[in-house]
Amino acid sequence: MFYSRTDLACEAIPKNLKQGDFGGVKIETRNHGGIEAVELNIINELGASIIKRSIGKYITIYCGRVWLYEKEFIIDLEKIISQELKKLIYKYKKTPCRVLICGLGNRHITSDSLGPLVIDNLDATGHLDVYNDYKSFLISPGVMGESGIEAYDSVLAISRQVNADLVLIIDALASKGLDRLCTTIQISDSGICPGSGIGNSKKEISKSTLGIPVISIGVPTVIDSSTLIYEALNEAKIENISYELEEILNNNRNFFVSPKDSDIIVSSLASIISNAIELAFKNKNEIT
């Protein structure tokens, strides 16, 4: 059997699940003036087995092709992302906090550079006495192939050094659907496993491994080539594929597809996410 590769929790929801509660899974849709946010809440181990994801909240914002939109829409979108982000941030921290913000990924590969670009757009405040609401510390540890150090080890060491009580991680993800490629943003409090979307999983970065809450923001920027073919067959209602084709699909997972304008797209998304993060921490009392 072929399994489509995806980091998006919304793409792992069985088709028979809609709104409401389903044995450890709760799905809620919110509409922000035409921009839809779907919250998937995996409550227990039964829900985790259904969705095949860790227990936690997964908020998917369907934002569309933002790199083509007007400034007014972008401003509204940044506010919406910050509102959804605050629901998770202040679930854990009702008081001023010290937050380590980590941009994962390889800045030299366009489709994987979202995390480092977000960090480039942010300002660190951990060293400034005038910022009383929150202290932010910024890191972009790169990839293991460059440093020889896993992202988890860097985050663990630095979070302890700066006495962080919250970790916020930004990373590029993999999707299984073209319609969600670079057009959705996923926010979660379940942690993250770097590289899982491309079959190169590293140590999990989560509350259970760090001892402090971990919130992640991700955007799908690539699709596995085999997944793309398999999903196209599904859309064409070709469900029964030959054993030979299935073998090819299962053994051809080192080729990934990204949009042709990835540089413009990822840069736009990085700007939007960084602005939303700033809004979320600076306007903590405006949770809606």
Image (cartoon, rainbow, N blue to C red):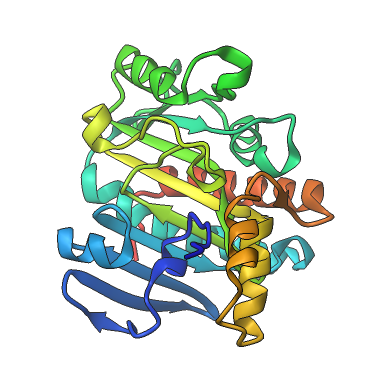
Residue 24 spot, x, y in % from top left = 17, 69
Specify the quadrant that holds the C terminus. Answer: bottom left
- Name the residue furthest right: 260
Q: Nearer the viewer, residue 8 or 113?
A: 8
User: Left or right: where does residue 252 sit relative to residue 169?
Assistant: right
Q: Nearer the viewer, residue 138 or 205?
A: 205
Q: Residue at x 69, y 57 (%)?
A: 225
User: Left or right: where does residue 47 sit relative to residue 154?
Assistant: left
- Asked if residue 182 shows in the view, the reply is no
Indicate the quadrant where residue 146 lies: top right
Residue 190 spot, x, y in % from top left = 31, 48
Image position of 138 with respect to 45: above or below: above
Q: Nearer the viewer, residue 14 or 44?
A: 14
Indicate the quadrant where residue 220 lies: bottom right
Residue 205 spot, x, y in % from top left = 36, 34
Q: Residue at x 65, y 78 (%)?
A: 233
Q: Residue at x 16, y 74 (%)?
A: 23
- Asked if residue 39 shows in the view, the reply is yes
Q: Residue at x 22, y 35 (%)?
A: 208
